[in-house]
Amino acid sequence: MGGTEGVLKFLAAVSVDEVRLFCRVIGRTSTSGIVRRQRQSVVTELLTALACDHFPDTKLRSADRRPLLRQYVRMLPACTADFLDTWMSSDSLPTPNAKKLMEAHPDLLRNRCLQESGSEHDTERHLDRYAPLLTDLPPLPSAEPDISESMAFSTRLLEELKEGRTQIEPDQFHDHLGVAQ
């Protein structure tokens, strides 16, 4: 296909529905362990070129001027964690599907959850966004025997609350975890 440049030309020539399907398929490759780092680098290069208006330092630039950012965002789970963090820190880029990102980049999202818990973010929206990390994502065992990754993170967040490093109202924490008071 000609590498990233070939893919850019291809995507500029196909319909929006085909771009949507392409982005969805690429995004779904995020949890595959086969050559993961290499694939993340290539997908990051592609997404940076597609969203070149938001990344002026990128060398490759898409010639396609259609407003397709909402389609391109579907590829974010397959990008590098550093790029995802940059994307999520931007106010001018669309918000990605957090659940897919939690499956692909749980460590990054856990760190963002803890950082945002200690800041002045909207607590209700914050917990809505990160609740799956506390209840069921990623669906993997943790390093501790008989404890899931989500349970280990919930315990860590409780410890942060106890130590005063996190500022979540207790009733909101209980409401989002389904714990009776």
Image: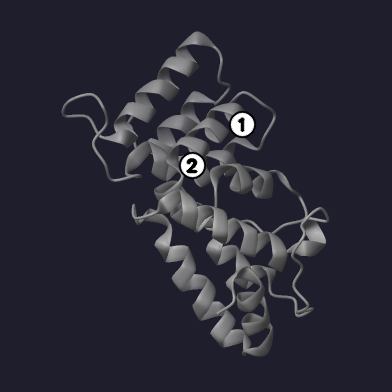
Disc 2 designates what residue?
130
Distance CA(mark 2)–CA(mark 1):
10 Å
Q: Compared with residue 92, is residue 181 higher up or lower down, i.e. above or below? A: above
Q: Compared with residue 57, is residue 143 higher up or lower down, i.e. above or below? A: above
Find residue 52 and report its horizontal and vertical position in percent: 77, 63
Q: Residue at x 47, y 29 (%)?
A: 171
Whether tag 2 and tag 1 are in contact, CB under 8 A, the answer is: yes
Disc 1 designates what residue?
116
Does residue 124 appear to the left or right of 58 in the view shown? left
Q: Which quadrant holds residue 71?
A: bottom right
Find residue 151 and report its horizontal and vertical position in percent: 30, 31
Residue 94 badge: none
The answer to whether residue 181 is seen in the rendering is no
Find residue 174 and report its horizontal and vertical position in percent: 41, 31
Neighbourhood count class around disc 2 (C-alpha, 10 Å): few under 14, some 14–19, many 20 upward? many
Neighbourhood count class around disc 1 (C-alpha, 10 Å): few under 14, some 14–19, many 20 upward? some
Foreground pick, 107 / 152 = 107
Q: Residue furthest left?
A: 146
Q: Residue furthest front?
A: 2
Q: Residue furthest top?
A: 163
Does residue 51 appear to the left or right of 164 in the view shown? right
**Amino acid of disc 2:** Tyr
Q: Residue at x 63, y 64 (%)?
A: 46
Q: Residue at x 57, y 40 (%)?
A: 126
Question: Of the residues under marks 2 and 1, which one precedes in the sequence?
Answer: 1
Classify mark 1: helix, strand or loop. Answer: helix
Classify mark 2: helix, strand or loop. Answer: helix
Q: Compared with residue 103, is residue 164 higher up or lower down, i.e. above or below? A: above
Q: Which quadrant holds residue 136?
A: top left
